[in-house]
Each structure stands twice: as structure tokens, then as C-alpha cells.
Amino acid sequence: MSEPTRFRLSGGSSPVGLDGPLICYHSLAEAEAAVRAADYGNLVAGSIPFDDAAASSSLYLGWRNTERLESRGASGSRADFRPDIAFNDASIADYLRLIDDALLLLRSPDSALEKIVVARAERYFYDGVVDPLAMFARIANLYPNAQSYFVEHLEQPGVYTLGASPELFLRKTGHTVTMTPLAGTIVRDTRLPESEDKQRARAVLFDAKYLAEHRHLVDFMVKGLAPFCPELDCPDEPVLVSAPGLWHLGTPITARLSDARTPVAELVAALHPSPAVCGVPQAEARAMIAGYESAREYYGGLVGWVDSDGDCEFHMALRGLELDSHRGHLTLRAGGGVVSRSRIDAEFAETSAKLATMRRVLGIPA
């Protein structure tokens, strides 16, 4: 009997999967050491959680597979999904309470908090069986320009994280490190032609509020890379990045490692969780998130791979959902960066636009 599919990544680059038998790891450092030793397998792949103090990684060591699965069941029948009204209402209440309390701190001269990423969740029930690989195929077909991802949870077989990431967190190829951190977001205006909406987005996002939010993220990433990379190229200004339903500010960063053998696990530890999903200062933001939100687990974490050469590619686990085949429900989650000048209505609209990415996968009207 063949090994079940545990990991898939598909998008702009060639698809990546794993052939088994697979060896499982909760630690990126241990998994990376194993694949670099080349005793077995040539690829470690899976998910790293938002907060490793609250959840463990799901990492699998095996053999790289580049077979395309995107067409599997992509147009097949889908279940009917019903909202979990009690869960969704409680999540919205917690979301609004956290934003309200965060804004008090952000606007206080005595507080160290400068930014916090606040998220809310939606849950949907379903009857019968949902094929997780068919859902992955639908995601990949709906969002060909994103990095579609699929990971089965190591500690909870039958629970899957899937999505369509808009953001490259870290790519390492020999000495070269590249990333494109995103922060600063507005919702698309579908009433306008794209060219006009792009001009509108540029006029709105290249504003002191959004540029300051984005600078928090860029400064954090540059500071994290500095001990490893004496050479670093970071533009002074971000660029406008297109995503389904949204416009983002992004900054392409390229750096050269002083030592190509630098462990990927050390880079990840220095850079994650970044202000793109957590906040500034990191410790204060993480504590507030843990106190108000239901457990994020892999939302806001990383999904990707490390190979036997020590090269890697990780994307942010955003625009996604968790499929629990045992309990018969799916959980969607989306968030946005809150700073002192943020407005609650705009933040809520942003999360709705992000949630719409996976609602579309479920066939739920926006």
C-alpha cells in the first residue's frame, strides 16, 4: 500500500511533493540535520507553526516528487458547508475586543506596542466526506499565481492545512537568500478597471500609515538577516503587489550569506514569527494574541521544504484553512496589521477580503 500524500506545494515554481516511506520530525533543526546527512531521503517538507510554544511542527523526510496533482478532482462535486454560528460570533467578538484593547495601547505614549496582527476565524460544518487532495487541486486551479500548499498534521492524522500563500518568506539557494515580505494591505475595488484600481491602491498605500507599518516588517527582517549576511540589498521603497481581492506593499530583499552552510533552522529562528503575522515588539504582540485568539497553530506559520544541499523554500501559511476530517468541519482564519492610525471598519473589511479567498474554494458567496 502506497504512502498517503502528506505534503504538496504548487505554484510559480515546479510542484514539490514527497515519496515515502517517510520519517517524521517535530523539530526543523533535527529534520534538517537528517536530510543534510543524506543517510535517507533528499527532502524535508511540511509546516512550522506560528508559535512553537503552542504547537509543534509537522515535518516529513522523504524523496522529492514533482508530479502534478492540480487537476485531481478540481471540478468534482463539493460538499455543502454550514456556518458554525456560535463559533463565528465568538471569534468576531474576540477579534473586536483585541483590536479595541490594542488600539488603546498603540495610542498610549507609555506603551511599547507599535504594531499587532489581529486575526479572526470562521468555521464551517459539512456532512459526508471531503477529499483533501481534491480541495488542494481546486485551490491550485483557482489561484495559479499563488503558492498552493497542503500538509497533513503529524500529531493529528486526518487534519490538514491547505491554502494559497501570497508571500515568499525565505528562499535559500547556495549563498543567496531572497524574500518578499508583505505588509500594508487594502481591498480591491472591483467596480474599477484593474489599471484604475492599481492607481487608487498606489495612492492609498504609499501613505505614512501604511509605509510605517511596512517599515516595521522590513527593518525586522533586515536586522534578523544581518548576523548571517554581510551583503544585503533592500530597496528604500516597497512595490505594489497584487493578490486575489487585495493589494499589498512588498519589498524584495536579496542577501548573501557569509557561509552557505548556515542552517536554515537558524535563519527561521531569527526571522519567525515576523511583524507580518505577529507584531512589534514581538513578545508583547505574541502574548496579546495568545490571550485573545483561539490557537492559530499553522496559520501565520511557514510551509515549505529543505533539501539535502541545505537549500530551502518557505512561504507564509496564509489565505488558508484547516480541514478536520474527524470532526467534519473546516476553519478559515485571516488577520491584518493594526497600528495606531488603524480603523476598525477597514481592518474588518480587510479580513473579510482575505477570508473570501477560501470561501470561494468552498463555494460560499463573498
Image: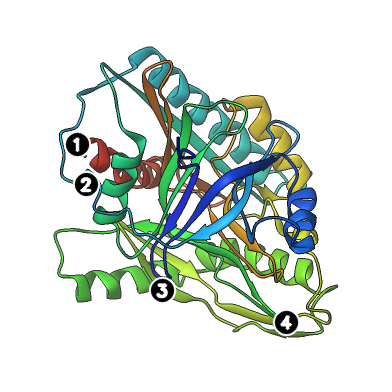
Q: Earlier in the sequence, mark 4 or mark 1?
A: 4
Please indicate whether residue 143 sits to the left or right of residue 94 in the image: left
Mark 3 lies on residue: 240
Between circles 4 and 1, the one closer to the viewer is: 4
**Label 3 is placed on what type of residue?**
Leu
**Label 2 is placed on what type of residue?**
Ala
Mark 2 lies on residue: 74
Q: Secondary structure at mark 4?
A: loop
Between circles 4 and 3, the one closer to the viewer is: 4
Distance of label 2 from label 1 (alpha carbons): 13 Å
Distance of label 4 from label 1 (alpha carbons): 44 Å
Which residue is rendered at x = 29% and y = 70% of the image?
200
Mark 1 lies on residue: 363
Specify the quadrant that holds the C terminus.
Answer: top left
Image location of residue 243, percent across then percent down: 35, 62
Q: Secondary structure at mark 1?
A: loop
Q: Secondary structure at mark 3?
A: strand
Labelled disc at residue 175: 4
Between circles 1 and 3, the one closer to the viewer is: 1
